[in-house]
Image: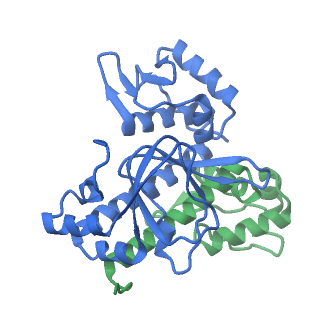
Amino acid sequence: MVTYNEPNIRLAGNIVDSIKTMADLLYEIKAGTPLGNTLKTLLNLCHRDAKVSAGGVMTLTGISFVALASTTDVSEYDLQKALDYLQQRGIFTCRPASWKEC
Amino acid sequence: MDKIRCMKELAIFSTLDFIEREKIGALAGKKVYRKNEYIFRESEPADTIYLIKYGRVRLFKVSEGGKEITLDILKEDDILGENTFFEDALHTMDAQAMEETFICSCCKEHFGLLLQNPQAALKIIQLLGEKLNNYTEQVASIAFRDVKGRISAALLRLAGEYGRTSDEGTTIDIELTHRDLANLVNASRVMVTNILICLRQEGAISTNGHRITLLSREKLAVSPEAF
């Protein structure tokens, strides 16, 4: 009987989890869903404007929630759902500057 | 059939000794899939891991609008069905043979046994890592590159995987239709055709039927920004 807490099995499981996330995101981007468009916009904003810390964490500041929705061409409702998903998967974290900003 | 070798002869198990390879061979299921036959469908229970001996498999999802979104094209020695690692998991995409494809399979418990062998585990983890890198690169490619850049990047990647070098250049040694390429890079078939004509005129590639030869890697310039 296999014990699934062995280190190599846990490592493989973690990679499989990441594969699943990236495959899902690839689908969302290719299908042009609100989540895919949000991720694409955020990646490009990071590529252009983000400050990169010594640990490799990219930080974007001063983005209005409304402007982000407009740039991404999604509704504010869809943008919130997309940001919630990306935060839940640990890809982006958002810190609101005010109630209307994420 | 000469092409059919046993699972124990797959490259990922080449570092194992004779007894271990025999053990792996005994655990494996084997099946030849015909062109367009499904290996598994989205939402089916994921209880088997598959390794390709020869042939090609397309992984795709169907969008709400009914469009097939290609996520990857797998080849010999690639792994699929890795969702089986999770308890009570379902497949999250479809897997379909693009040509006659021979596949070895083993159930979750047997795959766990393979992972207990350090050398086999290392090979499997490397394979999974490559798969993760491929998806990550595709996400970055679509996010950051225009269609020409995506096609160039896809051609360079395919040449790395399927390339056969000659005096002329590197030929991608698989039948690749414009539609296949369009599915891979998320562009229309017409756009792919136009860009391949453009790349041919620039002297970056030559084409012969469905075979593409890379004449100049330097000329396959990658457009960095899509936004």
What colour do you see for chain B?
blue
**Picture coordinates of residue A44, whole percent (x, y):** 63, 49
Residue displayed at 77% across by 52% down: A72
**Picture coordinates of residue B102, whole percent (x, y):** 40, 49
**Picture coordinates of residue A47, whole percent (x, y):** 58, 50
B203 relative to A42 in the view: left or right:
left
Q: Residue furthest left?
A: B18
Residue displayed at 39% across by 84% down: A4
Residue displayed at 46% across by 74% down: B85
Q: Is residue B29 above or below residue B212?
A: below
Q: Relative to the observer, which residue lies in front, B221 or B105?
A: B105
Q: How many marks?
A: 0
Colour treatment of the image: by chain
Quarter of the picture holding the N terminus of chain B: top left
A37 relative to B8 in the view: left or right:
right
Q: Is residue B186 above or below residue B60?
A: above
**Picture coordinates of residue B116, whole percent (x, y):** 27, 77
Q: Relative to the observer, which residue lies in front, A76 or B162?
A: B162
Q: Is residue B204 above or below residue B40?
A: above
Q: Residue furthest front?
A: B1
Q: Is residue B210 above or below residue B123?
A: above
On the question of residue B106 being in view, the answer is yes
Residue displayed at 41% across by 25% down: B218
A1 relative to A52 in the view: left or right:
left
* Residue B18 quadrant: bottom left
Quarter of the picture holding the C terminus of chain B: top right
On the question of residue A42 being in view, the answer is no
* Residue B177 quadrant: top right
Query: Which chain's colour is green?
Result: A
